[in-house]
Image (cartoon, rainbow, N blue to C red):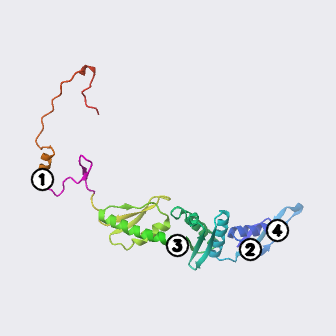
């Protein structure tokens, strides 16, 4: 790839920064040197061709280790595989410093490593950065969660929304339930609050729930006959017969104002 600068050194530095590599990891060819005119004024810029000796995966590993050093994280990155995808494993003195809350820090490292690995590539390679098997454990948790909440959605006959997740975790939920016969999945919302909703194929109407005097939930006596409901009303002091209107009690002090009116 060609890079230009006021000097050859400046052009080379531009190429090294573009690839994020050191000079020893680059193949450099000088196309032309800078040309100066009268009084040292630059007449033509220098041009060089810089190619990276390192593969995308190795470049990403070198980038991560330099990043760990600058962040004072005692960790080492290892390239496990590089073919259609790139897999990198991180071994750290404190895995929590690399993983973060629910993998947020690890996801950030992965995004940066993916950007570095794909510099100059015509086709994009997916880069996965893991730390001591965290991805596998998290995926297993998500699979179990997806199946559990799918059963809940079917049982209740209602949509079940999951907490916001990153694109990788949402894909795990979608792929887990892709072959499920009784539910489908959709993603809703915008980042960073985008989440998966599990939708049952057969939805049930919402049940109207009532509450007794003690605050206990009941379902309005469904499935019981009219005789049972009448007996309940009698035993509770209720009657279906019309009530006589209450007589207004005799009180004193009504001249002070509307003291006997009901408050709204």
Which x, y percent locates residue 146? 40, 68
Q: Which residue is mark 1?
A: 228
* 1 vs 2, front mark: 1
Badge 4 is on which residue?
34
Q: Is residue 79 above or below residue 249?
A: below
Residue at 14 percent across and 49 percent down: it is 232
Task: Find numbered disc 4 in the image and state the secondary structure of the residue it sits on.
Answer: loop
Q: Nearer the viewer, residue 129 or 184?
A: 129
Report, in whole angstroms, how far the alpha carbon at label 1 lies from the one at label 3: 61 Å
Q: Are marks 3 and 4 in contact (CB under 8 Å)?
A: no
Q: CA distance from mark 4 to mark 1?
A: 101 Å
Look at the image and say whether residue 34 sits in the magenta stretch.
Answer: no
Q: Is residue 178 left or right of residue 86?
A: left
Answer whether residue 118 is visible to the viewer in this image. no
Asked which quadrant contains residue 56, the reply is bottom right
Secondary structure at badge 1 equals helix
Cα distance between the residues tagged 4 and 2: 14 Å
- Few, some or many residues within 10 Å of mark 1 (<14, 14–19, 20+): few
Q: Which residue is mark 3?
A: 133
Q: Residue at x 11, y 49 (%)?
A: 231
Badge nearest the viewer, 2 or 3: 3
What distance separates the C-alpha of mark 3 from that of mark 4? Answer: 52 Å
As drawn, the label of residue 49 is 2
Main SS class of the magenta portion in the image: loop
Left or right placement of residue 43 versus residue 54 in this view: right
- The answer to whether 105 appears left or right of 22 in the picture is left
């Amino acid at each position: 790839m060609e890079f230009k600068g006021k000097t050859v050194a400046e052009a080379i530095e531009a190429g090294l920064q573009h690839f994020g590599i050191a000079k020893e990891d680059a193949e450099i060819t000088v196309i032309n040197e800078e040309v100066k005119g009268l009084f040292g004024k630059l007449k033509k810029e220098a041009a060089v061709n810089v190619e990276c000796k390192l593969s995308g995966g190795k470049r990403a590993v070198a980038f991560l280790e330099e990043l760990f050093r600058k962040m004072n994280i005692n960790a080492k990155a290892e390239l496990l595989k590089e073919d259609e995808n790139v897999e990198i494993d991180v071994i750290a003195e404190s895995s929590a410093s690399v993983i973060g809350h629910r993998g947020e820090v690890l996801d950030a490292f992965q995004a940066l490593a993916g950007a570095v690995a794909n510099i100059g590539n015509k086709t994009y390679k997916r880069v996965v950065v893991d730390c001591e098997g965290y991805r596998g454990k998290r995926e297993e948790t998500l699979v179990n969660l997806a199946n559990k909440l799918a059963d809940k959605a079917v049982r209740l006959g209602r949509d079940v929304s999951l907490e916001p997740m990153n694109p990788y975790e949402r894909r795990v939920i979608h792929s887990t339930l892709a072959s499920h016969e009784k539910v489908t999945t959709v993603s809703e919302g915008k980042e960073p609050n985008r989440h998966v909703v599990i939708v049952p194929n057969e939805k049930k109407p919402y049940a109207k729930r009532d509450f007794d005097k003690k605050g206990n939930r009941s379902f309005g006596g469904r499935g019981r006959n009219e005789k049972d409901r009448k007996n309940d009303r009698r035993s509770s002091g209720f009657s279906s017969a019309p009530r006589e209107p209450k007589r207004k009690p005799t009180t004193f002090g009504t001249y002070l104002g509307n003291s006997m009116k009901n408050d709204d």
